[in-house]
Image: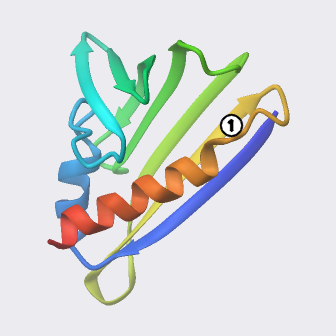
Amino acid sequence: MESETVEIEIDATPADVWAVVGDFGGLDWMPGLDRCTVDGDVRTIEMMGMEIKEQLTARDEDARSISYSIVDGPVPVESHLAVITVHDGADGGTTVTWRVDVEPEGAALFSGIYQGALGALKDKVEA
């Protein structure tokens, strides 16, 4: 299994950031997203001509953490688990971490995508 983690500091309260991150279907901040729909605990993301289904595996309001796995789509993974966590940051701000565990090794192409998405999240929340 391969793991990658990306992180960003956001100049907003953890509560404000969690209000965006904690909404499993609220991905309007994600770059390149054409459409996102939610049916139960599965969201379908359409982007760049692809359709990817992700299943919510955990959501912890107190820990401000949301976890999901890719369950269908053209992404070449055998196993995938992503966890986004919103932490108290410096000076009243927020630190957001996005970790992914994926198999097979070498399939992790997510860090660049996630880092770009965190930049877009920062722009949205700080605006």
Q: Give the camera-side residue of 127 and 62.
A: 127
Name the spot of residue 86 as percent of width and height, x first.
Answer: 37, 58
| Amino acid type at mark 1 | Asp
Is 6 on the left or on the right of 60, as rendered?
Answer: right
Disc 1 on helix, strand or loop? strand
Q: Quadrant of the N terminus?
A: top right
Name the spot of residue 110 as percent of width and height, x first.
Answer: 61, 43
Q: Can you identify the residue that label 1 sits on?
A: 101
**Image color mode:** rainbow
Q: Is residue 127 above or below residue 120?
A: below
Name the spot of residue 40 as percent of width and height, x first.
Answer: 25, 10
Q: Give the camera-side residue of 63 and 5.
A: 5
Is 89 on the left or on the right of 98, as rendered?
Answer: left
- Specify few, some or many for label 1: CA neighbours under 10 Å numbering under 14, 14-19, or 20 or more: some
Residue shown at the point (43%, 30%) measured from the top left: 48
Q: Is residue 110 above or below residue 67?
A: below
Q: Is residue 87 above or below residue 103?
A: below
Name the spot of residue 38 as percent of width and height, x first.
Answer: 24, 17
Is 78 on the left or on the right of 60, as rendered?
Answer: right
Q: Is residue 115 above or below residue 94?
A: above
Residue shown at the point (26%, 39%) measured from the top left: 27
Count of numbered circles in the view: 1
Residue shown at the point (63%, 26%) measured from the top left: 80
Q: Quadrant of the C terminus?
A: bottom left
Q: Give the camera-side residue of 13 and 110.
A: 110
Residue shown at the point (21%, 62%) measured from the top left: 124
For residue 108, which quarter of the picture? top right
